[in-house]
Image (cartoon, rainbow, N blue to C red):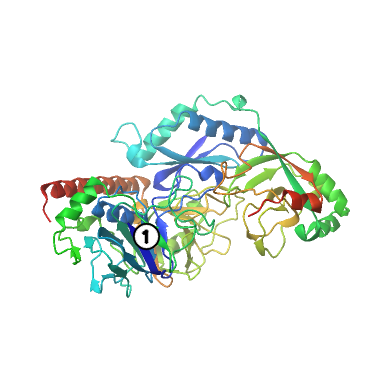
Amino acid sequence: MQFAPLGDRAVMITLGQAIDEPTHRLVRAVSAHLDAAPPAGVVDQVPAFVSVAVHYDPMRVGGDPALPPYERMVDALRTTLSAVRADELDAPRHVEIPVCYGGDLGPDLADVAVQHNLSPDDVVRIHSSGSYLVYMVGFMPGFAYLGGLPDNIVTPRRTTPRTAVPAGSVGIGGEQTGVYPLESPGGWNLIGRTPLTIFNAARTPAALIGTGDRVTFRAITRREYHALESPT
Amino acid sequence: MTIRVISGGLQTTIQDLGRVGYQRGAIPVGGAMDRIALRIANVLVGNEESAAVIEVSLLGPALVFDESTVIAIGGADLGATVNGSPVAVWHAVRVPAGASLRFGRPHVGCRAYVAVAGGIDVAAVFGSRSTYLRGHFGGFAGRALRAGDALLTGSMSPRSERIASTLRGDQSETVVSRWSIATSLRPRYSEEPTVGVVPGAHTDLLTAEARGQLTGTAFRVSSSSDRMGYRLEGPPLTPRERIEMKSEGVAFGTIQLPPDGSPIVLMADCQTTGGYPRIGEVASVDLPLIAQLKPGDRLRFRFISLAEAQQRYLERERDLSQARIGLDLRHIRGAS
């Protein structure tokens, strides 16, 4: 567990080197521990692939006021995190995302298939049979980075990103797959779209997918897609 | 009380001190670009420091106040007038019913904060009234203000009532307070400020030459700068090696180095995580100086220690807290 300043109001806690499940479990354990017993002054935290960023208010950190707030914050974090155990996590939540693959909703499906000498149906079968782990949420509200993409459909990002990827688009970017929660620019290969609203600030909870969740995709027809589409 | 928007200006939004506690869901903190200006403006009208205010950018809006109230403008001097008479920044101003607030030519800086007694009353989204333009949520309908909008304000605090009563004068007149906030608390805005930078996780990645360029160059703020980040133009900064980064937390003030070598300073609406090397973080007390820069302005960096950045932060916070208490005492005595 390494501590380093992230400016004058945050600490970066680094918990590993590689994106793998043991590191992920430690990240989640540290995150849960900070929620349960936050040291004085902690205002927010950002669990990521191999780290947790802890944002704090230097005015409200405890300890000896003669010491700089950063040192006092790190001391408090060391103390509270000495008891962290990665084997005490809650069971992951399971989220199923219905996806209509191919056609105009997944314009890159055929291209991905060609790159792997597969048929489009093969790509759909492989993608929708995987079980994916949400390593982190970042980039834009509700955007979940999913790990666990089967090797035989790992596909490099498009050379030219699209300026506008529609909300709900399901893509493959390198070894990762995910769903765009909002319309945004993007360079991933789009293989389908979900009718679900992945992120809506006016809804509780706003995001369907959170860090630590297990995600699976279920192939649906165009008819089912329209039936499930929520009016916006 | 209702504030009617006659014209929206370039980019006028409702802002407060941002969303705290939702970054793990990649909800940006957002909020005012120049936080000290927002806080002082709120103090001047007797609001909580975190109350929602109107952030005005470069070319201001035209606003009409339906009832008499107390306002204060913090931040840049954007040539504000009430019913045609100039009003100074950093002062409380009692405006009469029907008063029209307009803006003229910007002097130094580009963002002004209009605090109104009672605060701007819009629904909180993720605990904040800030407008997040990219996400289309928060503030007034998730967007910048435009002609025809009507804003409501909250009810005045007893402190605001006391301030209003000290600004004596004819009910039809605009009354500007003789008192203000200590000059030492007002940021020294400039078109070429030098800001303190705390070394970051990847400062060592810069070659000696690049490190010298970082502190020896007046970087130009590019035209593709916005509330999310400022892109800087100057000599490309070369890293010693390319490193494989895993996306992780960033902060308001993080200086990222993308592969093209042009640094980006992350600002109020920055994303919660990033995958570029972090060559430093701007000292929090100096962020207002950057927030007031517009495309074409210049910016210089100097490295300072983390301890110095935090010391300056603690001093600033104590000074602001004392100033607030000083103003309270003055208003209780009823001086104007």
What is the total number of numbered labels drawn onto the structure image? 1
Which residue lies at the image location 39% right of the left edge and 46% below the top edge? A8
Q: Where residue B223 sits in the image (x, y, percent)?
A: 48, 71
Q: Is residue B149 left or right of residue B313?
A: right
Q: Which residue is mark 1?
A: B54
Q: Quadrant of the C terminus of chain A?
A: bottom right
- State the residue in front, B281 or B216: B281
Q: Chain of mark 1?
A: B
Q: Answer with left or right where residue A131 lies relative to residue B37.
A: right
From this view, report whether residue A61 is shown above or below residue B5.
Answer: above
Residue at figure coordinates x 40%, y 36% from the top left: A73
Element class at badge 1: strand
The location of residue A158, given as percent across then percent down, is: 72, 61
Any part of residue A19 in sight: no
Residue B97 percent coordinates (x, y): 26, 64
- Horizontal and vertical percent position of residue A180: 65, 53
* B29, above or below A40, in the image: below
Q: For the point 42% across and 48% down, which residue is it?
A: A7
Badge 1 amino acid: Ile
Q: Quadrant of residue B299?
A: bottom left
